[in-house]
Image: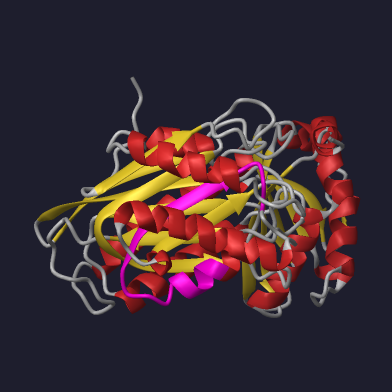
Amino acid sequence: MKTLPLPKGFSAAGIAAGIKKKKKKDMALIVSETAAVSAGVFTTNQVKAAPVKWDIQVVEHDGVRAIVMNSGNANACTGAQGMADAEAMAALTAGGLNVNPLDVFVCSTGGIGKPLPMELIAGGVETLFKGLSPDGGLNAAEAMMTTDLASKTLAVDIELGGKPVRITGLAKGSGMIQPNMATMLAFILTDAAVEKHALQCALRLATDTSFNRITVDGDQSTNDSVIALANGQAGNEVLTQNSEDWGLFFQTLEKLLFELAMMIVKDGEGVTRVVTVRVIGAASNGEADEAARAVANSMLNKTAWAGKKPNWGRVMDAIGYSHAQVQENKVDITYDAVPAVRGGMPADTPEEELVKAVSQEAFTIHINLNLGGGQAVVYTCNCTEDYVRINKE
């Protein structure tokens, strides 16, 4: 039987509390048996859901004990009642642990504009406590899902200062995926001892190279949250950015977040192709990013990829309307190793070779603006009829 190994001192549960119309798991609880150092990165959307506003306060505290979450309702655009309900979720959970409500992160995901069904939430919290287990990680991951076809989980074991350490990640996300960040939640748990400022810096940097590098549909959510808890139960010497093992810890964290991010892209709503857009030769890294995102978010490109059409003219068009500096006669475009454009003009490549390149389940579009040293990469996907079917409800 498949399980998700949790770090030492963590337990989890996931249940169907009745929030979703269909009887599916829709509430999860993750608990550390001792106070954990926390870090968080949250949506940059100006419209933030109540739980995000609550969690921005929680992350400032020194010790955190739990994350409680629900799916099926975002608790966004719900005014003062929404804030009261988010705090009530924290208080209900805190009561079961005999701690301060500000020791509890609250996360929600789902439809916007409807108040939380607090009677169901209250009953759900009580049931979650009864089901807490070191083997409950997969149930929690399943409860996080909305339109996801599969849960996203990963656990990695390393050694720090001679002590075995585990880092476990749980994530959800399928649609409304666009940095910075996306309709996604990610919980990163570790039994490593990590200094708070160092953990926050590591989480932000790792998020920038993972969750902030993906886009499914160009839409940004109100609820996006990446939360990390480190409870120190591995017994290693407290890690700082100056520690000998810091590089190993950070690289492991960064790789784990990247793999979770790619799981989100591959499970994007209606996705059949994963596309990497890599831009080099821009006037700056920022301009490379602008060009890459323009290509990655273009619905004309995404639908062409769905139809196995290279249509490099749409790529040129997107580069041109981006905020990046572009000189048409210097642009080179390559699909994997197959040249499509050289110096802004069609390359001498048979059409069938380009079609073969974009017919793969995964391929890379290499764009060289030939103007400077700026570079960027964005991971995206195609857009099929299934995306419309899922989102017209």
User: Is residue 215 or residue 322 the one in the foreground?
Assistant: 215
For the point 65% across and 50% down, the residue is 116
Residue 129 visible in image: yes
Total residue callouts: 0
Is 361 positioned to the left or the right of 347 in the image?
Answer: left
Question: Is 112 rendered above or below residue 267?
Answer: below
On-image quarter of the C terminus: top right
Is 348 positioned to the left or the right of 256 in the image?
Answer: right
Question: Is 284 rendered above or below residue 219?
Answer: below
Question: Is 268 rendered above or below residue 206?
Answer: above
The x, y position of residue 135, in whole percent, is 30, 33
Locate residue 156: give its quadrant: top left
> Magenta residues?
54-74
On-image quarter of the N terminus: top left
Is 181 positioned to the left or the right of 252 in the image?
Answer: right
Which residue is at the far front? 119
Queried whether the magenta region covers residue 115, the answer comes back as: no
For the point 41% across and 51% down, the residue is 256
The x, y position of residue 148, in whole percent, is 62, 36
Is 295 positioned to the left or the right of 314 in the image?
Answer: left
